[in-house]
Every structure is written in C-alpha cells, then in structure tokens.
Image: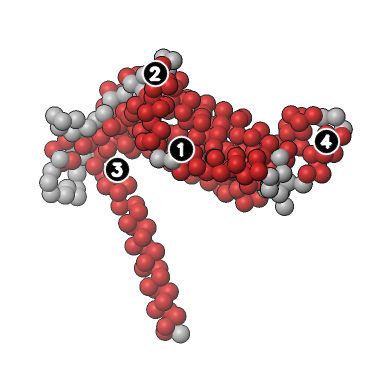
Amino acid sequence: MKETRTRVVLSSAVVYLFVLWCIAPVIWLVSTSLKSDVQAFSPTPVWFFVPQFHNYVDAFVNGGVGHSMITSAIVAIVSSVLGIVAGLPLAYLSTQIWPSESVQSARLTLGILLLTIVPPVLSLTPYYRTLFGIGLTGNAVGLTIVHTFYAILLAVLIFRSFLVNFPREVREAALIDGLGEWRTLAQTILPNVWGALFATFVLALIQSWNEFLYALVLTSGDSSTVPVTISGFLSFFGTNWARLTAAGVIGALPIVIFAIVVRKHMARGLSFGGVK
C-alpha cells in the first residue's frame, strides 16, 4: 500500500514538474510584456511591478501587429480551404479509383511523404526563384500558394487514412445510379469525412499561421505575417523586450483561443470521423 502511494505521489510530482516546465516560458512572456522597458531589460528578475498595458497598444497599433494579423488570417484561411478542396479529390483518387495497394497509389503516397519531410530551407530557393519570375514575391499571393501546397499534402494524408477503408461498394452503387465521380465524391464521400475535413482545416490553419521561413522571404512590408512582424522588433540597435513580448502574446493569442475552442470537435473528428 505504501509503495503504491509513493508511486502515485512521484508520478504526480513528475507530471506537475513537466507542466510547470512547459508553461514557464509562457509565464515569462506574459509577465515581461506587462513590465516597463527598464524592468524588462533588468539583468535581475523583477517579481513585483505595476502592469504596463500600453505595451500591447504600441505593439498592436504602432508595431503593425494588428495589420499583420489580418494578412495571416487571410493567408491561413485561403490556403487551408484550397488545400482541402484539392486534397480530398486526390485522396479519393488514390483510395477509391485506384486500388489502395496499386503502384500508382503507393507512388502518390510515397511522393507526398517525401515532400512532407523535406526541410523547408531546401525548397526555399526554387520557390523564391519561381515566384520572383512571375512577380509574386513581396506580397501575400506567393506565400498563399506555398502554404496551399503544404495544406494539400496534409489534407491528402489525413483524408487517405479515412478513405482507405471506405467500402468500394458504395462508390460502385453511386456510379451505377449515374452520379458520376464528382457527384459521388460530394454526395457519398464528403458526408462521411466531415470530421476529417474539420481537423484538416484546423491543422492547416495553425501550420500556416505559425510558418516563418517562407513568410520571411516571400513577403515584405504591409504583406508580412505575424511571425515576420514580431521578428522585426529585434534589431542591431537594441530590443524593446516589453514591446516584443507583448507582440508575441498578441500574435499567439488568436490561435491559442481558436485551438482551445475547437479541440473537442477536432479530437472527435479524428477519432470518430472515419468509416468503420
């Protein structure tokens, strides 16, 4: 009995320490954003201070975070929707039209996996040269195209895991009734993958919102996204840590709230959205 109790206490202590380790950077970020410039730059920790909320106003209005949030939202939503629109038919093609064990399906899946694991820095130059040649750098259009590509990869992988066990008889019956492939996809497949569709949208949205490297190279000025705008608070002439951390809190808050709101629906969609 004592050994069991000791084990429970130790397990609880480990869990609490891990949680504290995870939230410590968040606590530091929020507390620093509420300090004055002198307190934030102080080499010794300042535990007691009067909150300075003007840092958030300066970061949101004067720092351009508010405008960049609009850009990030547009890029994330558009790329996520386009990724789903293109990814679902590809997953349908590789699982329903092609046999899942066929060579074509295996090649498509392998190609998507390879493209997913390639480090972004390796594909940065080809993307930049291509988009620069057609005049799509320095704005959000080129970035949306790149984010859409990665949203398609994510969508295919998620939808394929749902459709690989979908009964082929349902598709065959729909085709016999004269629906055609597109109407079959819309009327028989889509209603069964709403959970996966919602989960894909959420994951693609978060992925686009947090992406930094492509956004740094492909956008500039008013088209910059939130991560790029926040990085602009760092300079060789000095860093206003209070304003920088306030910008970080503002930039992270929308996606954190969004993830908290949809977490149950996303988990339900991934767990029960598939066809058994």
Which residue is label 3 attached to? 30
Amino acid under label 4? Ala
**The disc labelled 2 sits on which kind of residue?**
Phe
Is residue 42 visible to us here? Answer: yes
Relative depth, front residue between 132 and 246: 132
Crowd around label 4: few <14 · some 14–19 · many ≥20 (10 Å): some
Which is closer to the viewer, label 4 or label 2? 2
Residue extending furthest toward the bottom: 1
Nearer to us of marks 1 and 2 is 2
Work out how far the residue at label 4 is from the one at label 3, CA to CA, in angstroms. Answer: 55 Å
**Disc sitting over residue 132 in the figure:** 2
Q: Quadrant of residue 190?
A: top right
Between 276 and 134, the one lying in front of the other is 134
Provide the secondary structure element on which disc 4 rests.
Answer: helix
Q: Earlier in the sequence, mark 1 or mark 2?
A: 2
Cβ atoms at labels 1 and 2 below 8 Å apart:
no
> Which residue position is annotated with label 4?
174
What percent of the width, then of the height, locates residue 44?
Answer: 13, 49
Q: Which mark is nearer the camera, 1 or 4?
A: 4
Q: Quadrant of residue 51?
A: top left
Of callouts 2 and 3, the N-terminal one: 3
